Image (cartoon, rainbow, N blue to C red):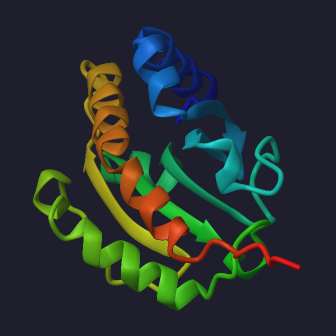
Amino acid sequence: MNLENYLHKFENAVNAFDKKVLEKSGLETQTGIWLNSVVLRLQKKHWANNPDEQPHSGSAIFMGIWIDQEAFSKKILKYNIHALKLRQLNGYALQSRTFANSFREKFKEFEQKWENVSIQFGPQTLMEGWIPLNDERIQEDILNLINSFIEITPLIDETLLEFQKKERKS
């Protein structure tokens, strides 16, 4: 697998995406090669304590679309939504499992729109799935995944609101 070749394909997909739609959604994108994988990460700034960290090791919620050697061998493109170290996310009083359960309950309405998706994971992976890898249409497939994620970003924001720290009045 040629990582640079796939990085170029991922970057082309991001560059082809409508910037106004992305801006309106509040999502930011990052592409790169992290942990021997080509990755596209989508997140809102307030979903991470350090939104520019690559890869995330601190508190963050983000969608990843990626390909690594295993996925390449299986001819699939993977995607997921991670929720890492949520107890430490600034501005919220979160418990990972409670957050995951609340998000997944809301996600059920959209689940059938996601190919090969599962929510049967621990609280750090809110959902994960894959689509067949087709080099001829990888850009279109990535764009479709981005659009599908934009449709469910309000679920993450709504779930976060449930756990927002209340300011004390003195």
- Could you tell me which residue is drawn at 54 percent across and 35 percent down? 27
Nearer to me, 73 or 27: 27
Instruction: Say left or right for 53 vs 109.
Output: right
Residue farthest to the front? 170
- Could you tell me which residue is drawn at 61 percent across and 88 percent down? 95
Nearer to me, 94 or 144: 94
Res 113 seen here: yes
Instruction: Say left or right for 21 vs 68.
Output: left
Residue farthest to the left? 112
Instruction: Say left or right for 61 vs 166.
Output: left
State whether residue 10 is above or below residue 51.
above
Q: Position of residue 30 (x, y in %)?
A: 65, 32
Nearer to me, 144 or 23: 23
- Could you tell me which residue is drawn at 42 percent across and 9 percent down? 16
Q: Position of residue 156 (x, y in %)?
A: 45, 60
- Could you tell me which residue is drawn at 50 percent across and 80 percent down? 99
State whether residue 165 is above or below residue 11.
below
- Quarter holding the C terminus is bottom right
State whether residue 150 is above or below residue 86.
above
Nearer to me, 29 or 35: 29
